[in-house]
Structure formats: C-alpha cells, structure tokens
Amino acid sequence: MLFHRLYVALVVIWVWAAQVHGHTLAHEQSHPTPTTLEEVEARLLEYRATGDDGIIRSIDEFFAGQVASTPEALLLRAWHAQAMHRFARAIEVLEPLLSSDHAHPWLLTANLQRVMGHHSRSHEACRRVAATRPLLGRACILLNASQQGDSVAVIELQKLEALLVMMQSQRGLGTEDQAWLASVLADGYWGNDDLEQALKWSSRAFMLNPTVVHEAAYAERLLEVHAPLAVLDLIDAEAQAPALVVLRLRALQQAGRLKHAQAMVARVDRQFRHDIEHEDYLHAREMVWFYLDILPRPEIAKRLAAQNWLLQKELEDRRLLNRVQALR
C-alpha cells in the first residue's frame, strides 16, 4: 500500500521545489528527523499542503543516514532529488523501478524528462505508461503537446474528459490521479484559449487535491484572466510557500493594493537577495516574477530567468525567458 501511494504522490507533484538551503517566505518551523519511511511519507504529504521548507530539511537528514534501496526508499529518494531540482538524479534513482509492471514510475520519468526539455524521451516514457494504463498514457502525451506550446485537438480533450468522468463514476481512479488528469485538461484547454474550461478544470484539480501545486496553478490562471480578488480569496495571507507568496503579491498589485504590502515586499526581496548571493536558485521562477512585476529589477530578472532555464524548461519557463529577453 505504501509503495502504491508513493508512486501516485510522486507523479502528481508538479516539479516545484522547496528551497533546501534557504528559508520559506514566512516563519519556518523546525521538524525532528523522521525515523521511518512511513514518517517520511507523512512529512511529504504535509509539505505538499504547506510548502514548509523545514520538512524538506528533516527528510534530507533522514536520507543522509539511510542507505536502504527498497522500492519505497528509492521512490522517496527520487522525490527528494526532484525537490532539489536534481532531475537527472531523480531519473537515475528511478531506473531500477522501470522494469516493474507499474505505470507510475514511467509517468514520473516522463514528467521529469519533459521538465528537462527532453520531449522525445518524455514521449517514449508516456508510451510505456499507455501500455498498462491507457488513460494515464493518453493524458501524458497530451500534456507533452500542450507543454511544448502546441494546441491539442478539442476532440482529444473531450475524449480525455469523458474517460475521466466515466472512471470517476466507476471509482476506477484514486483522487490524486483524478486531480492530475484534471490539471492536464486545464493545460490543454488553456492552450486552446478556452479559458472557461481551463479555469473549471484547474479549480477541480485543486478541489480534488488541495496541494500548493494545484493552488498555485489555479491562482496563476486567475491572474491571467485578471481576477486578482479571487486569488486573494484563494491564497491565505499567512501562506508560506514561495510560489503562493509571490502569487499573492502579484494579485495585490493587479488589484491596486500592493502599497499595503510593502513590508512583505521588503521581506521577500531580502530573502531572494540572500538566495542569489548563496547561488541558491531553487525558487528562480518565483524570483523572476518578483523582479519583473513586484519590485522591477530588469537586470536581476534577466540573470534569474537564464539561470532558471538551466534548471527547468517548461512552457512557463520559456515564456518568462522570452519576456525578459524582450526587455531593454
């Protein structure tokens, strides 16, 4: 049971990472080092809900003294490497698991390869997923297309939607798989400029699985349709995950209320400058947004966007890079 739950949890984590050598943008809590894989899994679930970097540190300490190579341990090691943006290392750790009949390690591999910009390898991994889990494999292939900036045929999205609804009615999918599929639909509809459907499925992904990842994706789309008040309702003022903190600041700016959050702007600026000084770029994407829109520093934003592109090459990263390259 633990083995299956970990597969699903690892796959649906959008590769947004904790800043292991820095701090969260709110109060960071201290956590004792876990002593079992079950405790590590529990911490993983807590981290996904809160974005508390102290949790990642405690897991890091666990692995420093743990050499087991059981499937469970390998999955958690892969997750930790992913959280550190060590995507190639995560793929390497997963390698022994790819000979099993489980689709999820191939699905995680496909996601990792896509983030690294290796789309042909990602597509091949998606095909391996489809061999045993056709619905997940089809979604994986569609996600690859939308993340390359290609528009996905509406009929394909409608087929995926119908299959998801059918599987939900038959209770043939776990909640986390359902949420991931909903997020794939949101990406596809967004790429086709069907904003209403994209928002519907992004909201559903968050409702099905209210993690920081799904919350941030939904908030991003609300900002794109100029609904900052909805973002402020969605993201609590006490949020500590960097992705959520920066999204809330962007919403305040869009709503004309940023002047009331200057203390937080200064705090984020101090933390990000500390990270840059220590060459810690695990939150480079959030840093770029911050120095583009919240506290404009074009030269800093350009350097960070280039650094971020070295780490991850998703569609948002490409668009950020194009945006800063257009700056004078």
Image (cartoon, grey):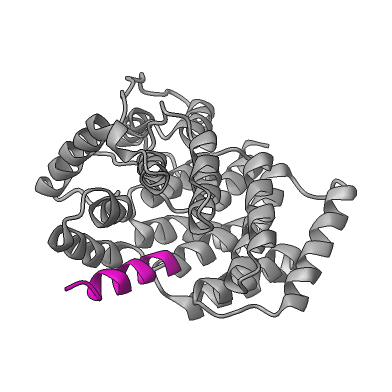
Outermost residue, left side? 277
Q: Is residue 140 visible?
A: no
Q: Position of residue 183 (x, y in %)?
A: 62, 56
Q: Position of residue 223 (x, y in %)?
A: 48, 53
Outermost residue, front side? 256
Q: Is residue 217 visible?
A: yes
Tell me the residue at 71%/43% (across/down): 175
Q: Position of residue 235 (x, y in %)?
A: 49, 35
Q: Main secondary structure of the magenta part?
A: helix
Above or below — where is 249 with respect to 131?
above
Quadrant in which the N terminus is drawn = top right
Horizontal side of 316 relative to 71 (left or right) equals left
282 and 6: which one is in front?
A: 282
Horizontal side of 289 relative to 185 (left or right) equals left
Horizontal side of 224 relative to 174 (left or right) equals left
The magenta-colored residue range is 315-328
Q: Position of residue 117 (x, y in %)?
A: 40, 73
Horizontal side of 133 relative to 323 (left or right) equals right
306 and 193: which one is in front?
A: 193
Number of labels in the image equals 0
Above or below — where is 168 with respect to 98?
above
Quadrant in which the C terminus is drawn = bottom left
Magenta stretch encompasses residue 321? yes
Tell me the residue at 15%/37% (across/down): 270
Tell me the residue at 78%/77% (across/down): 155
231 and 95: which one is in front?
A: 231
Based on the displayed image, in which of its 4 quarters is residue 153 positioned?
bottom right
Above or below — where is 275 with respect to 35?
below
Magenta stretch encompasses residue 33? no
Tell me the residue at 14%/49% (across/down): 276
